[in-house]
Amino acid sequence: MLQVYNTLSRTKEPFHPVQEGKVGIYLCGPTVYKPSHIGHMVGPVIFDTVSKYLTYLGYDVTFVVNITDVDDKLIAESNRRGIPMSAVAEEMTADYFANLKTMGVNSIKFFPRATEHIDGIIRFTQDLIDKGYAYASKGDVYFNVAKFDGYGKLSNRTLEQMSGEGGGTADRKESDFDFALWKSAKPGEPSWESPWGPGRPGWHIECSVMSCALLGETFDIHGGGLDLQFPHHENEIAQSEARHGKPMAKYWMHNGLMQASNEVGKVGGRKTRAAESGAKEGDLASQEAGKISKSKGASAFRDLVARIPAETIRFFLLSSHYRRPIDYSEERLAEVGKGLESFYRLFKRFKLVTGQSFYTLAAPKTRAEGDARWGAVPAEKKLLTDALACRAKFLDAMDDDFNTAGGMGTLFDMTRLLNRAIEEKKLETGGTDADKAELTEAMTVLKELAQILGVFREEQAEPAAADDGLTDALMKILIELRLAAKKRKDFETADKIRDDLKAVGITLEDRPGETTWSRS
RNA sequence: GGCGUCGUAGCCAAAUGGCUAAGGCAGUGGAUUGCAAAUCCACGAUUUACCGGUUCGAAUCCGGUCGACGCCUCCA
């Protein structure tokens, strides 16, 4: 039984969707004003995996990620570059989509844009005014937080606790805590006509409007980074629940943020506040680690994937529990990459043994399908039985609040099982058809689980492998020459060939029956 | 100041009341190999920051101490 940690209750709860058999997921997406950095991929990869697992469990999943394409930062970027806001948004949205694609995030069904929902935003805002939850003020419209009873229930705070914060009430707001639903346009800013004059939506309203439009007034899972819990999600709840009189989302899931251990913390409110509250003197605030963010100039994601395989990054993101913060470092990525190598080598070995590609194995797509296929396995099929024990452990981990890290451990266990079986049954130099068939079945179990995590989808391209086949031909000649040298016990020559190739980044492996090579 | 998270082997990390505290990286020994590489086998925390408590039993619950961090302001 799937358990999901709900920020609202601060406990794990059994998962029961609002509507039998269907699941709606809404994830707060990016403001598209600059190229994505790796931090922007955390949420999408996690919730893509959540979506894939729910689909595997048999649910009909609708996964929505919004694109915020109107906002103060977008306007600033548009002015800085001297191009229309829509051009900035278009360019950065394309960058975002390309990044999602390389990361294998492919379960998102809708990407609503704020500017496509202006009418809905205006209607929603008007409804809140009509119901007495919002007021217009000099062309702006604000949500009156004091009118909404449950304000603070998600982030566990009360208005009293928050008093004292804020830099003085803006003259248009009745209270510091009120937030904008609609902002009037200054001259030259992009704007839309509204009952309150020309303007644009506030930050929070689009999510309330678009989630409702695509998923309904109450949907199943609302996700986002921990940093959005307050005020963004709190305000979404206030808007939606004030208008609809029912819960906005059943489960609120928040992922931990990516930290950059060597980033310099920004100078700002936090430091000032720390000083005010009598915290330690000195420069700690500016030295300590902090989350990766655009304001700290984290490098563009597309530059990162140019150096590091996307699959390594995905594996890395899923290698710790989603609610924990994750420290970014290239060293860690390199370690994860080394771990992944053992899978890739196993897949190559499997192909040598059976002639089949792991990547094209037809594995069960749902748990029910898998349960049916693996239901009655005779005990003498030791390998397959052991693989299925790993499958059970994997699914238990995923059922426990999407514990991808725990699940990944069982994938490594499986590589050991499979390699051991290949050796014990001497499949590289012979073996029975029955043993090979069982090996294929066990590999299919691995494929079934890998699909859930969205890894090992397709063969990794060899770096710089796009030549005309000349390298293959040359390698064949070198390997033959070396084999001839080995046959006449001229190991000096054989070793020189191997060592020299190593020096140019090619590793030879003498396997039973043949010598393989790979780029390192 | 308010709210909250975290502290598990050299590093990363799972396990949140009960069998030998997963797994990865690094390391050591062995099998294999002409030698390697890869793979397999074996080895690493008498113990989960520290102190105290609850319990038949705690990494896991409670209290305290120390330490790291997040949010309260634009953020995924």
Image (tube, rainbow, N blue to C red):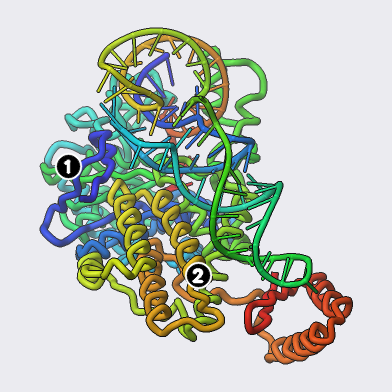
Disc 1: which chain? A
Which of discs 1 and 2 lies nearer the camera? The answer is: 2
Picture coordinates of residue A130 (x, y %)?
13, 43
Residue at position x 21%, y 41% in the image: A13
Residue at position x 47%, y 51% in the image: A319
- In the rendered image, the vertical position of residue A44 relative to residue A351, given as above or below: above
Residue A388 appears in view: yes
- Compute the Cα span from label 1 to label 2: 62 Å
Q: For mark 1, give the secondary structure.
A: helix
The residue labelled by disc 2 is: A424
Picture coordinates of residue B2 (x, y %)?
36, 18
Total tally of numbered discs in the picture: 2
Answer with left or right where residue A460 lies relative to residue A371: right
Answer with left or right where residue A428 lies relative to residue A320: right
The image quarter containing residue A379 is bottom left
Number of other residues with Cα within 10 Å of mark 2, as a class: few under 14, some 14 to 19, many 20 or more: few
